[in-house]
Image (cartoon, rainbow, N blue to C red):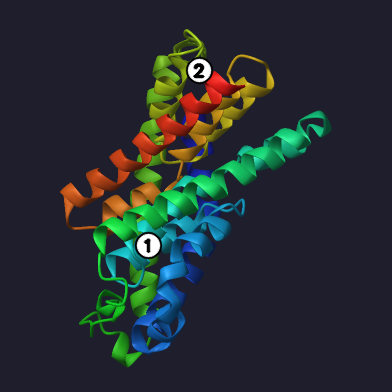
Amino acid sequence: MDILLEPTKESLITLPFLLLACLFIEYLTSRNVANKVMEHGKLGPIVGAIVGCIPQCGFSVLAARFYTMNIITAGTLLSVFIATSDEALSILAIHPELWKTMILLIIVKIAVGAIAGLLVDKHNHKNDDDYEYIQVADCDCGCQNGIFVPAIKHALKIFAFILLTNIALSLLIDYVGQDTLTAFLETNKYLQPLASGIVGFIPNCAGSVVLTQLYVSGGLTFGALITGLSTSAGVGTLALITYNEDRQDTIRILLLSYIVALVIGYLLTFIL
């Protein structure tokens, strides 16, 4: 039973933020606020990368929901996902000798997230003046009669998914063993980005914690760390899978984030 305690506690921590996020989403859905805010949608990837770098994976949840509501672009979503670092910054912050590395990591992830997002939007929307896709359609979720009940329903739905996934992942990691996971990452220097990018997709803080701790101990290169943390969107990955009914689109976005993460990871591996 002890193995179920940690994932349950971790999931419960996200519940208050999920409720606030869903209330915010329902508020935007019931009014024209989203359209007014997104009038400057071309800058979305830049804003998304900056916001995503704030050490709170809840922003990736908001981005995933906004994307499925057609409020933000695919580029903005990608920029948030790439910039999100989950627990990595907190771990690096307690090591003063790594503060320069932490600052470099933040700069790289914001730059890569913004550039990748802008390129995606440029490719997907050749007519830069056409932003009709940000219009919020009327919904039938009952929010016209209030925002609290729909928000609670949405928050509990994604919380249940997070809880079940965290429990399953904890059981899997316990079965496989953290030593095995570490050994998987401590491969050849030039294979590390491939491995860390896969680990980064673990949709809770476990992936970013293992990657950062391994980097701190000297077992992972900076390039591999960047790769893993660029695919580590935390709960946002779960939110995208839950909310996005277009499964192929979800796969495309996650695959694109992996490719971008690999490119920047290998560049840094060869440069540094």
Instruction: Check the image and report above or below for 227 versus 155.
Output: above
Can residue 1 be seen here? The reply is: no
Residue corresponding to mark 1? 156
The answer to which image quadrant residue 123 occupies is: bottom left
Q: Residue at 33% of width from left, 77% of height from top?
A: 150
Give the left or right position of residue 138, taking residue 266 as reference: left
Please state which of residues 182 and 198 is positioned toward the viewer in this rendering. 198
Disc on res. 178: 2
Within 10 angstroms of label 1, few (less than 14), some, or many (20 or more) residues?
Answer: some
Mark 2 vs mark 1: which is more N-terminal?
Answer: 1
Amino acid of disc 2: Gln
| Separation of residues labelled 2 and 1 (CA atoms) | 30 Å
Q: Which three-letter amino acid code belongs to the residue tagged 1?
A: Leu
Q: In which quarter of the image is residue 29?
A: bottom left
x then y, percent, for residue 160: 35, 53
The total of numbered circles placed on residues is 2
Task: For the C terminus, give its image quadrant.
Answer: top right
Residue at 58% across, 32% down: 209
Q: Nearer the viewer, residue 144 or 89?
A: 89
